[in-house]
Amino acid sequence: MTMIDEDVLINALNDVADTFVVSSEAPDRIVAEAAANEPPRRSHHVPTVISQPSRGRAYLVAAALVAVIASISVPLFRSEGNPNRAVVHGGPPPFGTSAQKLPLGGLKGYSAPLAPRPGSQKGTTITASGAATTSTGATSGVTSQKIESNGSIALAVDKGHVGAAFSSLNKLATSDGGFVASTQANAGSPRPDTFSYGTIVLEVPQRNFARLVAQAQRVGRPTSVSTSSNNVTAQYVDLQAHISALVASRRQYLVIMTKATTIDGILAVQSQLDALQSQIEQLQGQLNVLSHETTYGALTITVSEVGHHAHKASPLSGFARAWHDSVKGFFAGFEWLLRLAGPALFAVLTVGGLWGLARYVRRALRRRRI
Amino acid sequence: MPDDLQVWLAECYPQSVRTAYLILGNRLDAEDAVQESFLRAWKFRDSLSRESSFKPWLYRVVVNTCNSKLRHDIPRREGRVNDVNLVDIATNDDLPGRVALSNDVMCALRDLPVHLRVVVVLRYYADLSERDIAIAIARKQGTVKSRLNEARTRLALHPALRTDASRVPATSKEVNG
């Protein structure tokens, strides 16, 4: 690459600059003007934090880090430390799902997940005795709490006793005022390597649901029990309100219909009425389903012969378990990384943004100073 | 009061005003710019204590003022005349070839973009180091280096310096890269 020689450049610039005869009066003029414009002496106040770049930057970075860590850790602690926070801390039970695994071997003292908190008069309690009580607090008074309950139990019975277990369960349901919603059974042959198993779904009134859960476990040896309850009051009330509004609209349209005189007008109103009717029926259907679900609790019971379960649940050997744990840990690591990626990205963006802002402010201040 | 200012002026005014003159190419603009610069520098002298050295700081003020003039004042003024007149140099120097060369260099310098012209003047007239130039123009040292290289390359390729074949070998050199 060709470049001009530095000496040539220096000489040329000096030659040109030498042609400039510096006026001796100019400095005096500047001094005079500076004296005239001298403001009352005050220090040019620049915030200390910003005026000292390294210190200010350190403060900003530290503040950003604290903010980022707080924004990440607080939600994590709140969500992980106490998943049922809304249930535990005051107020009515949340309109959501709560579920709990029950210990095997009975339901004595079992309270449904939506049991009221100590000292609270609100909520729904379903006790093992089957007494379901729903009390309403300040927020209710319009509609009682609507709780839907579901559960599943896996029972193991001796070989050849699946049919008898089904009969017992059937009797339990009918005695509790419920019914059998569905059954499915697979009968094995007399050969020792085949097994019978089946599933039965029982529905009983909500107040008897807990009792049914307790009684069903006595039919065989429970291998797993789980129940869940949803408070669907909000959904229920919402549907009711929606239907009421639509019904009111329909009433208005009917009034308009009586006043319509032209065919076009009648047809237009009729069209609106049809649409409203359709919506009302659709919502009413949903309400009915919800009402049924909150009236009856559904318990799904899987009954199988003992050998069937034993065959399926073969214990892992030491190496197999180690391998299984290793693979599980590998994917857990990925999950962990993925979970951290979002907060990390947020942290990087926040710190980067603050750093850029600080840099901009610092430059602007320096520019202003000059 | 402004004893310090008088010291500043005694030490730096001539070189500052000539630097501004080389950047702006006009005597009156240069005097205006430097006067304004000194007043500004004096006004904000408190911030000087936080700067590492005085000279680059003052040149930054001068360069900023020159840039401001080139951006706002000079383009709005009609009939601006660059008064670089090197004929006067002939009286100081017996080499007419040198006068002509300086004239051509100035002509090429004037055609450079301002950001390149500033670094050339600061480096080869004001004799600031690359580090000080970086402070003066508020850019990184690497930027200063690349600007100097680009400026020197452009100057070497300028028609005013290329047409005279007899001078080209004397004013340019081959460098790698």
Image (cartoon, coloured by chain):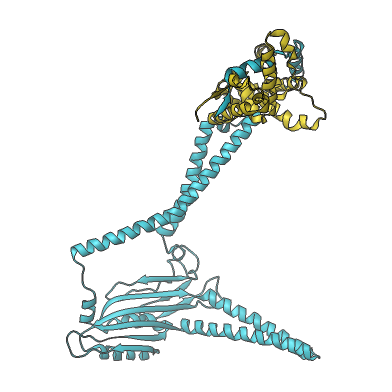
The single residue placed furthest to the right in the displayed view is B78
Q: Is residue A322 above or below residue B66?
A: below
Q: Is residue A314 above or below residue B116?
A: below
Q: Nearer the viewer, residue B142 or B62?
A: B142
Instruction: Please indicate whether residue A243 sits to the left or right of residue A301 in the image.
Output: right
Q: Quadrant of the N terminus of chain A?
A: top right
Residue A88, given in percent of the width and then of the height, sits at 43, 64
Q: Quadrant of the C terminus of chain A?
A: top right
> Which chain is depicted cyan?
A
Residue B166, given in percent of the width and then of the height, sits at 63, 19
**Number of numbered discs visible in the structure rendering:** 0
Q: Quadrant of residue B146?
A: top right
Q: Nearer the viewer, residue A112 or A4?
A: A4
> Which chain is depicted yellow?
B
The single residue placed furthest to the front in the displayed view is B166
- Residue at the image position 61 percent from the left and 18 percent from the top: A8
Q: Is residue A257 above or below residue A213?
A: below
Residue A112 in view, yes or no: yes
Residue B65 in view, yes or no: no
The single residue placed furthest to the left in the displayed view is A192
Q: Quadrant of residue A115?
A: bottom left
Residue A300, given in percent of the width and then of the height, sits at 36, 82
Instruction: Please indicate whether residue B62 sits to the left or right of residue A235 in the image.
Output: right
Residue B10, given in percent of the width and then of the height, sits at 67, 11
Q: Nearer the viewer, residue B161 or A149?
A: B161
Instruction: Please indicate whether residue B136 sits to the left or right of residue A177 in the image.
Output: right
Q: Is residue B130 above or below residue A126?
A: above
Instruction: Please indicate whether residue B18 sits to the left or right of residue A328 in the image.
Output: right
Q: Quadrant of residue B107?
A: top right
